[in-house]
Image (cartoon, rainbow, N blue to C red):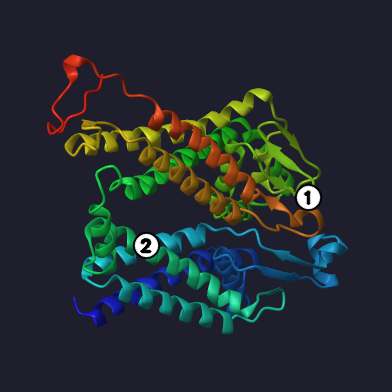
């Protein structure tokens, strides 16, 4: 396919991603404006609010400022006159990155991944710049370069990851193929190690996120009464309750990031000097946001057993890697003193690399799920990325190492095969 056509299709993908993200914010805001105020929607008020919410969802920090009248009307304390809001509803960023990854995949299949990635990223930068210059807002301000660079980076990284994964899997006729061929030239002991490390890390973090999602569902079931009680205390009508529910829904990935840190063990904060972890919950006054009713009132020593879930995820990754390595070594057995054997070094590298990748992704989730959610003590919210990376990495390493490094069984004299038979004897 011609490069210009690939660029145009990638640019169209970026436009769709940007418009969908903005529309998801603008449509509910418009309905809320009309049905609450009973007047025609005011574009001068709706668009700046839409732009700032979209920017926050794409990881752009907001600086909020309220005058005395606004503080009085909203019932906020004087310390809330000015504060940073950086705890992002990164459902928007996740959507943009996933959409960008699909665009990157299509660009590689069309014959020029780099053209697609660059075109989509450039168009996203243009959209972010246009949103910035058309959305002056005295209430919520942004740093201009952040408002352009961060949404662009979200889309660009997503597109690059999608393109690279497709190129590695199916080939691109260029740099990735050259790297792939070099890896294929390695001995049978090592040629599968890079792919297995990435796959292992992906399997492990998928297991950890799945366990966190399950913990979140259990919290919803067990703490539903507390959530409903906070909705009732808010004294909002059906429209207001719907708006609150939608606002909480876009924070679902953020809550999932909190749940990952809880399952891993370190837990997270909901304000300075607070902690929510399996070992215990230490909270002061928290905002009356209904979804915060999911927070457990106390911990338990027994709840520390949830840390076995990341270990199990690491074991699943190790089992997969061990099976692939065994099959590869059976078809082309590494030799030691003239006899086929399973080398230890590649298995150690796969186990460590799996843990590092899983820990790095967990740290990224924690970083995306951390920030400031209000003034004063609420400037600290979410998990500590370093602690989460260390916990997940060690837990996954333990599980992966158990499956990768455990002995496969002893060979017997009856099992001995000639060195060139291409088979391993396993129990």
Direction from residue 10 to residue 47 in the image, left or right = right
Q: Quadrant of residue 218?
A: top right
Image point 24% across, 44% down: which residue?
A: 188
Could you say which disc has been placed on residue 272 in the image?
Answer: 1
> Are the residues tagged 1 and 2 within 8 Å (C-beta)?
no
Q: Quadrant of residue 423?
A: top left
**Residue nearest the viewer, comparing 102 with 43:** 102
**224 above or below 117?**
above
How many callouts does the rendering have? 2
**Residue nearest the viewer, comparing 100 with 191:** 191
Earlier sequence position, callout 1 versus callout 2: 2
Q: Does dot 1 land on a helix, a strand or a loop?
A: loop
**Image coords of residue 26 (percent x, y):** 53, 69
**Residue nearest the viewer, comparing 382 with 316:** 316
**Image coords of residue 132 (percent x, y):** 57, 80
**Image coords of residue 44 (percent x, y):** 61, 80
Q: Which residue is mark 2?
A: 101
Q: Does dot 2 land on a helix, a strand or a loop?
A: helix
Could you say which disc has been placed on residue 364 in the image?
Answer: none
Direction from residue 69 to residue 307 in the image, left or right = left
Direction from residue 12 to residue 125 in the image, left or right = right
**Image coords of residue 196 (percent x, y):** 34, 45
Image point 47% across, 58% down: which residue?
A: 94
**Residue nearest the viewer, comparing 367 with 168:** 168
Q: CA distance from mark 1 to mark 2?
A: 36 Å
**Crowding near the residue tagged with mark 2, few <14, some 14–19, many ≥20 C-alpha atoms within 10 Å:** many
Image quarter of the N terminus: bottom left
**220 above or below 169?**
above
Image quarter of the C terminus: top left
Residue found at the very far front of the displayed protein: 337
- The answer to whether residue 228 of the structure is visible from this angle is no
């Amino acid at each position: 396919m011609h490069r210009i056509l690939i660029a145009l299709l990638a640019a169209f993908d970026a436009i769709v991603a940007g418009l969908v993200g903005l529309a998801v914010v603008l449509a509910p805001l418009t309905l809320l404006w009309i049905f609450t105020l009973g007047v025609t929607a005011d574009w001068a008020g709706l668009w700046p609010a839409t732009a700032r919410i979209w920017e926050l969802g794409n990881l752009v920090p907001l600086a909020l400022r309220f005058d005395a009248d606004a503080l009085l009307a909203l019932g906020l304390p004087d310390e809330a006159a000015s504060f940073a809001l950086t705890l992002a509803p990164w459902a928007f960023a996740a959507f943009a990155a996933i959409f960008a990854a699909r665009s990157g995949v299509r660009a590689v299949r069309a014959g020029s991944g780099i053209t697609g990635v660059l075109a989509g990223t450039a168009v996203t930068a243009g959209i972010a710049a246009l949103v910035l210059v058309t959305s002056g807002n005295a209430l919520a301000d942004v740093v201009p370069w952040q408002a352009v660079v961060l949404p662009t980076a979200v889309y660009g990284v997503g597109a690059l990851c999608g393109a690279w994964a497709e190129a590695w899997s199916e080939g691109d006729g260029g740099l990735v193929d050259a790297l792939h061929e070099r890896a294929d030239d390695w001995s049978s002991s090592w040629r599968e190690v890079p792919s297995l490390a990435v796959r292992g890390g992906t399997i492990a973090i998928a297991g950890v996120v799945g366990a966190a999602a399950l913990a979140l569902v259990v919290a919803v079931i067990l703490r539903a009464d507390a959530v409903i009680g906070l909705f009732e205390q808010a004294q909002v009508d059906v429209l207001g309750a719907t708006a609150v529910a939608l606002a909480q829904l876009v924070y679902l990935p953020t809550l999932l990031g909190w749940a990952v840190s809880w399952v891993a063990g370190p837990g997270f904060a909901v304000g300075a000097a607070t902690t929510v972890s399996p070992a215990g919950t230490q909270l002061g006054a928290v905002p009356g946001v209904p979804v915060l009713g999911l927070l457990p009132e106390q911990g338990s020593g027994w709840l520390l057993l949830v840390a076995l879930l990341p270990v199990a995820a690491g074991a699943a990754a190790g089992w997969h890697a061990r099976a692939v390595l065994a099959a590869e070594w059976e078809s082309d057995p590494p030799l030691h003193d003239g006899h086929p054997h399973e080398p230890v070094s590649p298995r150690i590298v796969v186990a460590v690399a799996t843990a590092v990748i899983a820990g790095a992704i967990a740290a990224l989730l924690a970083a995306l799920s951390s920030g400031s959610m209000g003034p004063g003590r609420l400037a600290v919210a979410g998990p500590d990325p370093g602690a989460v990376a260390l916990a997940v990495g060690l837990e996954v390493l333990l599980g992966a190492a158990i499956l990768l490094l455990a002995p496969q069984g002893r060979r017997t004299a009856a099992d001995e095969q000639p060195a060139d038979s291409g088979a391993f004897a396993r129990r």
